[in-house]
Structures are given as structure tokens and as C-alpha cells.
Amino acid sequence: AQTVTQSQPEMSVQEAETVTLSCTYDTSESDYYLFWYKQPPSRQMILVIRQEAYKQQNATENRFSVNFQKAAKSFSLKISDSQLGDAAMYFCAYRSAAGANSKLTFGKGITLSVRP
Amino acid sequence: DAGVTQSPTHLIKTRGQQVTLRCSPKSGHDTVSWYQQALGQGPQFIFQYYEEEERQRGNFPDRFSGHQFPNYSSELNVNALLLGDSALYLCASSAWDRGLYGYTFGSGTRLTVV
């Protein structure tokens, strides 16, 4: 079974600064997908960024980028130029590529606060 | 274009009762998955429905059951409620043949069991 570990329960960043959220995972599969989701107080899970395991290039979406280290099974999220609206819970998630609709396995999440 | 709609948004039930939660998927989606998110935890997969059949199931007891209707909407039923069933229940929809493009989540139903 796959597991996802987020060991930092809380992090804080100054507005306009950069912050990195950590995530490690464990799997015996070679083909899979990794995600970072944002959950604001509205409770809806919002996809921030996605990484395919077969791609060596790290994914980037505007101010959000990842550092994917497949051998180390590490998948961290970097948020640049942090904004007040980035404050939320962030979840790292794993999904097997075996099957188009395989389930998501989530970590426990990190609460990110942004100081003005 | 409506996203995923869940009802009700909040619900309070007494231990031992039964509850039904509802989910309408995003337009164009035919697959519905349910997740349970306890306070301070990440979501855990309950089950998934496609073509009105349960396709996958997580490690949840038989007290948790579901249904999918011909219009792709879905219900989650929980019998004999326990205090530990208090959680946020999230519904996520996807297109079965394009599931790898990702899920769309609803805002959830907050269930409190007293």
C-alpha cells in the first residue's frame, strides 16, 4: 500500500517571500502521479500542481513549482512571492497510474499561514 | 458550468441514526468518489461509483454504502452512526475515460454525530 507523509503540521511565511512544503511518499510502483492540493476555509480541494512520475522535469504553475526526487521519493512544493490568499491547508497526494480512476492517497496536510 | 454540488452543507445526527449525503457531479463527469476527512487529517478514500456500480472501495465498514443514479449523481449512506463518523465528507467527480486528467471536488458535507 502507498503512504504519503507530511511531517510539518504548520508553516508560516512572510508575504512576498518563498516557502517550501515537504512531502515524502512510499510506493513499490514505478508509474504514478503526485499532486499538491490546496484546501481553503471554503473546504473545497483545489488542485495546485501535478507531476507525472515518468517525467524528469519538475512541474511549474505560475508561482508554484515542485522539486520531484523520484529516487528519494520526495515531492516538495515551493511557493514563490507568497500572497495572503495562499493561506490554507496544503495536501500532498499520490495516485497510481494503474487504472484511469485509481484513488487518491493523501498526507495529513500542512497549515500554511501568510503574515502581512 | 456548475462544479460538484454536495448537500447538505452541515448535518447533526445522533449516535445510532442513519444519514444520507448527496453529490451531483460536474457536467460531463460520470464517475463519483467519496472521501472522509476527519478534523486535522487528510481525506481517506471510501468508495467510487461508475455506471451505477461500486468500482473501488477503501478500508471502511459495511455501514458505509452508496448508490449512483442514471444521471450520475450519487448518495453516501452511513448506518448506525458512531461518534467517530464525525467528519467532512468530500465528493469528487471525474470522467471515467479521462480520469487521469484529475478529479473535481465539492465543498463537502460536515457531519457531526452527538
Image (cartoon, coloured by chain):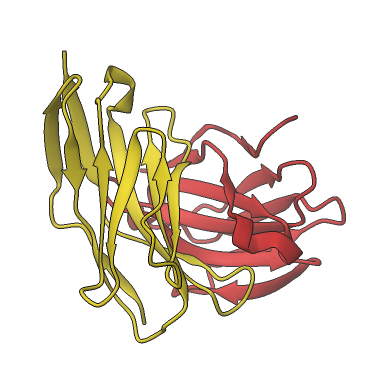
| Colour assignment, chain A | yellow
Does any portion of residue B98 appear in the rendered image? Answer: yes
x and y, in percent, of residue A68 in the image: 30, 62
Taking the view exactly as shown, the residue that stands out farthest to the top is A116
Number of marks in picture: 0
- Please name the residue shown 13% across and 50% down the image: A8
Q: Note whether B20 is above or below A51 in the view shown.
A: above
Quarter of the image where the N terminus of chain A is located: bottom left
Q: Position of residue B61 (x, y in %)?
A: 47, 73
The chain painted red is B
State left or right for residue B12 relative to residue B77: left
Give whichever of B36, B99 is nearer the camera.
B99
Q: Is residue A109 left or right of residue B63?
A: left
Can you name the residue that lies furthest to the front here? A57
Residue A34 location, x and y as percent?
41, 62
Residue displayed at 56% across by 71% down: A102
Residue at figure coordinates x 87%, y 56% from the top left: B70
